[in-house]
Image: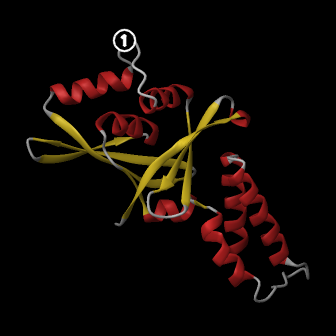
Amino acid sequence: MQNIKMDILGLSTSPSSGGAYALILSEAEGNRRLPIIIGTFEAQAIALELESIKPPRPMTHDLLKNMVVSLGSNVEQVIINDLNEGTFFAQIHCKKDDEPFELDARPSDAIALAIRFGAPIFVSVSVLEEAGIETEEGSKTADKSKTKGKQKSADGGDELSKLEELEKELQTAIETENYEKAAKLRDQIQKMKG
């Protein structure tokens, strides 16, 4: 299975989901983004490490890193490899004495560890195709191909204009960094196209 390298674009608050955060991953050599809703604690662990802020006592992910290192292991990479009923799944690829092994993890925990080890983050092609949001640079070519002809829906309504309207809303949500709304709009668009 092919995986795509991702960078951490940032963290965004998600007011409608009770204080959760959206962790935004961005395709390293492309224009897709992947928002993942994570908890406050995990967002804090990621943000502290991204900002190189060292708390006075080790946090959970710092402790995990220390344990992994003291056991003679290393985190080589993290792969977000599955999406099932709205839940992302990840694997932490480690190595001990040149023997690779994998650990199942939540993406937020896996990414918090990857940052601490300087390990790359990957997302499987299938997950990125299902849940990724294309930014404006990539959607310009898609917009040109959609304007060739309008399709009528079974009830006689103009389905393509609804689709175009949703895609414009999606683009606005991405530009305003409202990734939770963008994810919902993306799902609506996929249902209409599907």
Q: Whole-percent x and y of residue 138?
A: 60, 69
Name the residue at 72% across, 33% down: 15
Q: Whole-percent x and y of residue 193?
A: 69, 74
Question: Which class describes the residues within 10 Å of circle 1: few (<14), some (14-19), or many (20+)?
Answer: few
Outermost residue on the bottom side: it is 149
* Relative vertical location of residue 116 with respect to residue 191 in this rendering, above or below: above
Outermost residue on the left side: it is 97
Quarter of the figure that contains the C terminus? bottom right
- Horizontal side of 172 relative to 136 (left or right) equals right
Q: Do we see residue 26 in this rendering?
A: yes
Q: Whole-percent x and y of residue 52?
A: 41, 27
Q: Say which residue label 1 marks.
A: 57
Name the residue at 41% across, 29% down: 49
Question: For the residue marked with disc 1, what is the amino acid?
Answer: Arg
Is label 1 in a helix, a strand or a loop? loop
Front one among 161 and 153: 161
